[in-house]
Amino acid sequence: MEKIEHKMIAVNGINMHVAEIGEGPAVLFVHGFPELWYSWRHQMLYLSNKGYRAIAPDLRGYGDTDCPSAIDSYTALHIVGDLVALLDVLELEKVFLVGHDWGASICWYFCLFRPDRIKALVNMSVEFRPRNPLRKPTDMMREFLGDDYYMCRFQKPGEVEEEFASIDTAKILIGFLSSRDTSPPRVPKEIGFHQVFAQSPATLPSWLTAEDVNYFAQKLNKTGFTGGLNYYRNLDKNWELTAPFRGCKIHVPTKFIVGDLDITYHVPGIKEYIHNGGFKKEVPNLQEVVVMEGVAHFINQEKPDEISAHIYDFIQKF
């Protein structure tokens, strides 16, 4: 880990913390919620040893990267804009792109907005779905999953932050990272997140160390959760801003990986969409779909060696 270099780079009006190691073709890693560049530590070391330049930023609102105060500073256009600017500063015309969770969503947007900058994509957990022209995302979530669904609970500024502030950050992280419940996460206000995270396991899973948790917690204690939560608060704004892209496909060569215990894989209709042609229709250059047995949501950390090998096996073709 000590071989990984860290730097601050001015991009798109903010200062971004970037971790980097290796030389060769560049691979850009994009993390999810509530994570950091650190989520990709295993893959960065693996690929740097295979002759690649591994680059993993803290996205805006996370870690040592700036956290703008305005909620509407966290749209997909802002985040992709940050990453395009990063490539420009690093003088990288094209990169391999790897994403997970919210990072996967951002990678889909990246490939939608600027496919000219991407050689190939490896995305995890969150599939690409076409924009529904008639319904905003949060309206559909409330209709099908209810107001207690966690993404709906995240919408009101300050409310979840206040709940999280009363809970030990390490306990929140352990609750998120170690969960293997495949049902849609619902948190009624009368129960609250405090009671949910009180059920976090006392023993860490074998793939997560106290040092890992402390690293994440230290950074989140500094920034708070607002930056990451603001991504969810722009779901409807992203829907509005991407109206011109209605009907556009993802044409970048793509590999998709998901665990069979991932909550995203158990959303009603998703398995059918992924395996019965719908996903391939929207991502015509979808070359591989991998479903890993017995693996939950935080797949790149739970199965680091397997994920590193999956990434390498795909990108080395190009």
Image: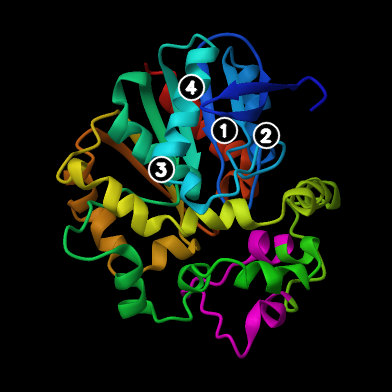
Amino acid at circle 4:
Ala
* Residue shown at 55% from the left, 59% from the top: 296
Q: Determine whether the residue tagged by mark 2 lies in a helix, strand or loop.
A: helix
Q: Quadrant of the C terminus?
A: top left
Q: How is the protein colored in the picture?
A: rainbow
Q: Decide whether residue 179 is among the magenta residues.
A: yes
The residue that mark 4 highlights is 85
Q: Quadrant of the N terminus?
A: top right
Camera-nearest residue between 146 and 237: 237
Camera-nearest residue between 232 and 105: 232
Residue 76, numbered circle: 3
Q: Determine whether the residue tagged by mark 4 lies in a helix, strand or loop.
A: helix
Amino acid at circle 1:
Ser
Q: Are marks 2 and 4 in contact (CB under 8 Å)?
A: no
Q: CA distance from mark 2 to mark 3?
A: 26 Å
The residue that mark 2 highlights is 42
The disc, 2 or 3, on the residue closer to the chain's N-terminal end is: 2
In this view, 62 is above or below 261: above
Q: Decide whether residue 297 is among the magenta residues.
A: no
In this view, 34 is above or below 52: below
In this view, 287 is above or below 315: below
Q: CA distance from mark 3 to mark 1?
A: 26 Å
* Residue shown at 69% from the left, 67% from the top: 175
Q: Are marks 1 and 2 in contact (CB under 8 Å)?
A: yes
Indicate which label's residue lies in the foreground, 4 or 1. 4
Query: From which residue to which does the magenta span run?
Result: 173-197
* Residue shown at 43% from the left, 55% from the top: 234
> How many residues crowd around disc 1 within 10 Å: few (fewer than 14), some, or many (20 or more)?
some
